[in-house]
Amino acid sequence: MSLETISTNRGHGGTQGVYRHDSAETGTPMTFSVFVPDHEPGTKLPVLWYLSGLTCTHANVTEKGEFRAACAQHGVIFVAPDTSPRGDDVPDDESYDFGKGAGFYVDATRDPWAQHFRMRSYIEAELPALVAQHFAVDTARQGITGHSMGGHGALTIALRNPDRFRSVSAFSPIVSPLNCPWGDKALTGYLGDDRVGWRAYDACALIEDGARVPALLVDQGTADGFLNEQLRTPLLVAACEKAGQPATIRMQEGYDHSYYFISTFMPEHVAWHAERLRA
Amino acid sequence: MSLETISTNRGHGGTQGVYRHDSAETGTPMTFSVFVPDHEPGTKLPVLWYLSGLTCTHANVTEKGEFRAACAQHGVIFVAPDTSPRGDDVPDDESYDFGKGAGFYVDATRDPWAQHFRMRSYIEAELPALVAQHFAVDTARQGITGHSMGGHGALTIALRNPDRFRSVSAFSPIVSPLNCPWGDKALTGYLGDDRVGWRAYDACALIEDGARVPALLVDQGTADGFLNEQLRTPLLVAACEKAGQPATIRMQEGYDHSYYFISTFMPEHVAWHAERLRA
């Protein structure tokens, strides 16, 4: 699988790159970013995946996430994919929370979405293989995190793949698409009305159905305008407590939904993952 | 002088705000950002000014500069102004390096620029008074830094006002507008052909003419495509050596002109200023 380099910049004692490839899953070119700390030639580093929220591309966290200093300090590779397929041939919706920029990390089954909107398989299978081929990642040491819709993606992907990820964290995640307007709209559109089929894409339902992760950390701002209606953190707290899933879920006083919040706690998340990813 | 709050976000244990006011100097609304770390009510904090480069507004460093963690750690207020007047009534040039976004921190004397392009007086007098009125700054403890055109601004403003600033630093500054195409174009346009009048806007000329600053730090990337023709760091090294101006001027291997470079060394610059701004 070939990879086109869009840009590389030296930063924080490592290389921040942006890359593009032709995805077999989405049937489109896909762009993602990778930060690789300087390291001894021949050695492999643990990898932290970061899934972005609604409307974002790889660029938001790459520019505003403040992860590089911590990743360089701890020797962690950081990969940030896009949130959906892109391009003129890809169907879209005029709203910000469905279609392009809003893939919700599902494999769509409904037309016209099913052809291109295969973000689950892209993140779970195609992109990891590509990254392992081109970068010095130790695939035995993977963690995953994300923000909002990407927090939902991180939690559900980790819960479905507990052998792949040693650690999962999230910033202000959508914890239950079954129980919020964003999730209702997106999963109805991509998957149809059979809500039983949605449970594989709902962190709370997955935990209720028996899925577990080795370690879970969530930060959520109390001043986040989406908290009560869309994100619904208390549902995750309840699901973890009921199921005995160990979790650290922290409410952060006065913080909102923005990258000012994410960048504040990013270094702690990187350090937390790194501790669990050490050999 | 009244101030309109555009936005505030909690970040890194402080408040990142964006504000707008009607500037008497530029005759336009002007927008700037201020980060204020949490502090004891009634106490005042030192302030670090950051002047941005060509094409930038306050937003670039506010989003990508990675200064908040260090400013919160050291208790330093961080102010980021715009780079020129803006608005439909302001004359402009079609190129990126003259007119809007390219004020060069001068008071223009040539028409049609003289009416609005008064960034020297705006940064030296009007904005400091406004900031002192509305924020908990200790005006006896000020430092200044900047990037590229803003590095030129920081150096020249500090050299002209040694009693106001205890410290000045710069990221990849234009060190001598008298000796580079960017400077030649901008100062000819704003000030006219009399190059003697330019010397107040040229860091190397100011040092040669006797100006001094208490402490000076510069970081410059070796992979910066503007280094040889526009930035010309060696001219500043020579001017400081000849004049006996103490300076730490560091060439950073492999770094370019981008915010990936700035954000890498920003925490060190904030710490360096903070050390000199302590009571």
Image: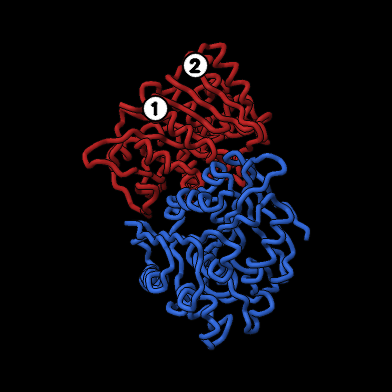
Chain colours: A blue, B red
Chain for numbered disc 2 = B
- Image quadrant assignment for residue B130: top left
Residue at (41%, 45%) from the top-left corner?
B32
On screen, residue A65 versus residue A239, left or right, reads right
* One can see residue B20 in this view: no
| Three-letter residue code for mark 2 | Pro
Question: What is the residue that sits farthest to the left in this orientation?
Answer: B42
Image-quadrant location for residue B214? top left
Number of marks present in the image shown: 2
For marks 2 and 1, the one nearer the N-term is 2
Q: Position of residue A43 (x, y in %)?
A: 68, 44
The secondary element bearing badge 1 is classed as helix
Mark 2 burial class by Cα count in 10 Å: few <14, some 14-19, many 20+: some
Residue B271 lies, in percent from the top left, at 43, 32
Name the residue beneath numbered marker 2.
B246
- Residue B241: where, in percent of width, then height? 56, 13
Between B82 and B73, the one lying in front of the other is B73
- For marks 2 and 1, give the one nearer the viewer: 1
- Output the chain of dot 1: B
Mark 1 nearby-residue class (10 Å; few <14, some 14–19, many ≥20) = few
Q: Is residue B79 visible?
A: yes
Residue B132 is left or right of residue A23, and the answer is left
As helix, strand or loop, the secondary structure at mark 2 comes to: loop
Residue B260 versus residue B174 in the image, above or below? below
Residue A157's mark? Answer: none
Q: Could you say which disc has been placed on residue B275 in the image?
A: 1
> Which quadrant does the N terminus of chain B fall into?
top left
Look at 70% across and 56% down and name the residue there.
A132
Q: Is residue B156 above or below residue B189?
A: above
Q: Quadrant of the C terminus of chain B?
A: top left
